[in-house]
Image (spheres, rainbow, N blue to C red):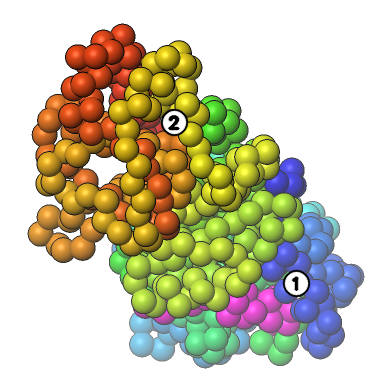
Amino acid sequence: MADAVEGPIDRLLDDVWRQVCQIDSGDVATYIPALATADPAVCGLSLATLDGQVYTAGDLVPFTIQSVSKPFVYALALADSGPAAVLARVGAEPTGDPFNSISLDEATGRAPNPMVNAGAIVTATLVAGRTRDEQFTRILTGLSAFAGRPLDVDEDVFTSERETGDRNRAIAYLMRSAGLLDEDVEEQIANYFRQCSIVVTVRDLAVMSATFANAGVNPVTGEEVVPRDVVAAVLTVMATCGMYDYSGEWLYRVGLPAKSGVSGAVAAVLPGQLGLAAHSPKLDARGNSVRGVAACELLSDQLGLHLLVPVEKVRSGLRRSYRADLMRSRRVRVQAHRDLLDEHGGSIVVDELVGDQAFASVEPLVRTVLADASARWLVLDLRRATRIDTAAQMLLDGLIRQLGADGVEVVIVEPRAHAPRMVARELDPARHRFPDADAAMEWCETELLSQHGVNSALPDELIPLAQQDLLDGLPADVVAAIEARTTTRIFTAGTVVFEEGDESDGLYFVGAGQVAADVKLAGRGGRRRLSSIASGSSFGELALIDGRRRSTRIVAIEPTMCFVLSPAAFADLWASAPAAYAALGLAIARSLSQRLRYSTADVAALEQT
């Protein structure tokens, strides 16, 4: 597997970035002189997950946060002053008016909402602090906590905004006349200008958005920035008011709570899954980044991020992961092959997914798999997947194709449910598919053995008794004594060798061909495969030793020839050749002991996963 961790999300972001960079409409904001100097060609994207992984594409240049600061300061105000105090001054209703309208809510006399300038100016005065300087320190340290690193202010932009911000100043004095601001209007509006002049990158905004998605806990630092109940209120207002008079169409097209700013930034949140950010200075007539809006629309469409699309309740993701050096298929193999699998089986990895597969459940799996340089075979077990959404399908398909290009063989265990099975069949069609993980593991083991010089095909020639795994290493006279008492039986494909519950008729050594052991499922009907047994291996020793009835059914998978040591012949061996009898009994005991050890290892591996 390649050492690089670049995967499907990196490629998707890069592809979207290249597409939106072709868009050349819109204009850079000029009403704030310092913003007019922004490079119109700049474009950057970022996506942050809830476990702190951050993906980026394009330009990561610093810029001032502007109005994208509003939901984060609103969250600080709610946390510091409480919802009742904030709602007394700032409403939560969309206006349909431009973000810099000079107006109050006619019915309540409050600022309309915290996402327009009127509400944001008031909100900035509701954070903790005995003085205006202390309040701004609270804003700066709070936004730094959201970003997961210390932020600072662009003093040139602050000066430019303060010198040219007459419209915002007019809004502030209107708020003062309505009793929503205190007497020191200039100090209060200065804090708002300074808040908008805080410098961030598109990566910072993605982490800040992911903090909202993570219920107020920064996914990079682990710090709780604001309480969980604050986040719901903020995301509600972002969803209805965050994109100004485009908010309704934005929610219709993109389906994510979001906030835009005149520096060309857009920050969006998918609760419980991710934070998304875009930055490109050219704005449309509403004040939203043209490329930023287009990028978010593309990502939402391709990843299926729309918040209001119904999903299954379960989002369990990865159920367990294990390797073939700890857990094996049920294929019974000779000792030399078992030794090879003990040594090299770690290169076979099984990842079992369960429940509703979406971005948040599949993305960590993709990252983990790509970081594993030791895997050469991956069994992607989707049997228990109940739904595979658009994002999960895209990620899984990208992962499978990338692994294939890196020389990793991916095999798919198909989902049991019809709908996810149809989606799974659209994944890279070149992949091998199996009905269960055991069959998939057996195939991978056979491929591994083949790469180490073991012929994957069944031998055309008979494996004599002396070369049988159970008798390997026994003296020639012991083998001869056993061989003299065996009979030969031949079975056509599909023939039942013996049934579950039958009386014991002997110990079977497979000379050529292959059989399968299965048991009846109590109460449900049908049968479950326990193991396959190929030439060189044996079966039936338990009933031979304890004299009890058969515990499994044995069916010939293909034309098969066996050497059979009957109970009568076994008794005769004890009477006539006790040394051979003892040697065979010890060999059977060792074989059963080894099987028990493998079973114990399997149970331990299951406990670990």
Answer yes or no: is residue 23 visible: yes
Could you say whether the residue bearing mark 2 is in a helix, strand or loop?
helix
Question: Residue 288: within the magenta?
Answer: yes
Residue 398 left/right relative to 506:
right
Which dot, 1 or 2, sits closer to the camera?
A: 2
Across and down, in percent, residue 514 comes to 42, 49
- Please give the residue where the numbered disc 1 appears in the rendered image: 15
Q: Residues within 10 Å of mark 2 (few under 14, many from 20)?
A: many
Residue 317 image point, x, y percent: 42, 55
Distance from the alpha carbon under mark 1 to that under mark 2? 62 Å
Q: Quadrant location of residue 454?
A: top right
Q: Which stretch appears magenta?
A: 287-310
Image location of residue 488, percent across then percent down: 35, 42
Residues packed near mark 1 inside 10 Å, few (<14), some (14 to 19) or many (20 plus):
few
Vertical placement of residue 243 versus 72, above or below? below
Which label was assigned to residue 583?
A: none
Q: Residue at 87% x, 73% y: name it.
A: 41
Out of 113 and 3, give the one closest to the viewer.
3
Q: Residue furthest top?
A: 579
Disc 1 marks which amino acid?
Answer: Asp
In this rendering, is residue 274 above or below 93? above
- Amino acid type for the residue under numbered disc 2: Leu
Q: Is residue 57 magenta?
A: no
| Quadrant the C terminus occupies | top left
Label annotation for residue 465: 2
Query: Is 80 left, or right, of 541 in this rendering?
Result: right
Vertical order, 334 against 252 (above or below): above
In the rendered image, which quarter is residue 180 located in?
A: bottom left
